[in-house]
Amino acid sequence: EISCSLVGSEMCIRDRDQKAAKKAASFLTKPYSLLSTLTTTDTFYCSQLVYQAYRLGAGVSLPHGLPGIITPSDLLHAGATEVTYRYE
């Protein structure tokens, strides 16, 4: 595990992202539901899974526009996330 000693450093960001990814992986067996809210952890929708992974796994609360939900656009503009594409 990488230790995070300098806030905002590349090492710190990598540590945060690894913690969020590990938490996200623990949610993968949970059912999908578009009716989930930001605080729900027994069902997820795509953006909410990312939000909860960062919040519970890395202690980062991503900004969101509407109360109780987070959208893909919120994630795009959060500043703490990066959009990547993967094709297999």
Image (spheres, rainbow, N blue to C red):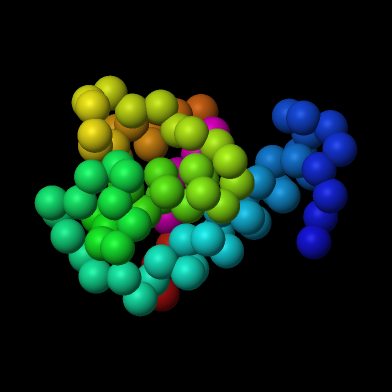
- The image quadrant where one finds the C terminus is bottom left
What kind of secondary structure does the magenta stretch mostly adopt?
loop
Q: Report the residue that reaches farthest toward the left.
A: 35
Q: Is residue 21 magenta?
A: no
- Give the residue displayed 23% in from the left and 27% down from the top: 67
Q: Quadrant of residue 45?
A: bottom left
Residue 46 makes an appearance in the image: no
Q: How many marks?
A: 0
> In x, y percent, where is residue 17?
61, 50
> In x, y percent, where is residue 70?
28, 37
- Give the residue displayed 84% in from the left and 32% down from the top: 6
Q: Quadrant of residue 2?
A: bottom right
- Give the residue displayed 45% in from the left and 33% down from the top: 62
Please state which of residues 85 and 63 is positioned toward the viewer in this rendering: 63
- The image quadrant where one finds the N terminus is bottom right
Is 77 left or right of 6, judged from the image as shown? left
Q: Report the residue that reaches farthest toward the top.
A: 65
Residue 80 makes an appearance in the image: yes
> Magenta segment, which residues?
80-85
Q: Quadrant of residue 12?
A: top right
Position of 69 relative to 86 (above/below) = above
